[in-house]
Image (cartoon, rainbow, N blue to C red):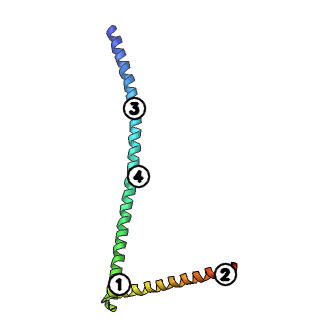
Amino acid sequence: MMENNELLSLLKEFIKESKDADAVNVIEHKEINTCLNTLKVKITKVESLCEASEGLRETCYQKQNDIENRMRRVEKLLPLENLADKFDTLAFKVYGVMGAMTLVMLIAGWFLKNSIQGTIG
């Protein structure tokens, strides 16, 4: 009889430990499923981004090829020799005009300041 009580108590302890382990397993499985679902969502997003980028790359290459073809046609139509020298000349003219405009603005500001001071004083 004593042996039966010991076996019965061991069985009860095993059942209790099994229930506790099952509860822990349920919690851990829930966490694992949450992580897996999050991972699936992220993978889906990455896949859709990859598909979209493939389309964007194709469009970009088409536009780049179109621009290059147009530039080649322009190069054939326009004499682009000494382009660097022409750019330097143009830049010099632009900066000259900008400098002249700045000088005119300074003189106008000085005249305006003097005319205001003359009417006040």
Q: Report the residue that reaches farthest toward the left.
A: 81
Question: Which numbered mark, 1 or 2, is in the foreground of this view?
Answer: 2
Tag 1's secondary structure?
helix
Answer left or right for 25 relative to 121.
left
Q: Mark 1 — residue?
A: 70
Q: Earlier in the sequence, mark 2 or mark 4?
A: 4
Q: Tell me what residue is drawn at x 41 percent, y 43 percent.
A: 34
Q: Earlier in the sequence, mark 1 or mark 2?
A: 1
Task: Report, in whole angstroms, how far the alpha carbon at label 4 lies from the one at label 1.
Answer: 43 Å
Q: Earlier in the sequence, mark 4 or mark 1?
A: 4
Numbered disc total? 4
Quarter occupied by the C terminus: bottom right
Task: Report, in whole angstroms, how far the alpha carbon at label 1 lies from the one at label 3.
Answer: 68 Å
Q: Mark 4 — residue?
A: 41
Tag 4's secondary structure?
helix
Question: Which numbered mark, 4 or 1, is in the foreground of this view?
Answer: 1
Q: Mark 3 — residue?
A: 24
Task: Report, in whole angstroms, how far the alpha carbon at label 3 lies from the one at label 2.
Answer: 92 Å
Relative image position of residue 64 (x, y in whole percent): 34, 76
Determine crowd level at label 3: few under 14, some 14-19, many 20+ residues with C-alpha closer than 10 A. few
Q: Report the residue that reaches farthest toward the right.
A: 120
Q: Which mark is residue 118?
A: 2
Question: Which numbered mark, 2 or 4, is in the foreground of this view?
Answer: 2
Looking at the picture, which amino acid does disc 1 mark? Arg
Tag 2's secondary structure?
helix
With respect to residue 28, does 41 lie above or below? below
Q: Earlier in the sequence, mark 4 or mark 3?
A: 3
Tag 3's secondary structure?
helix
Please name whichever residue, 95 or 35, is drawn nearer the observer in this view of the structure. 95
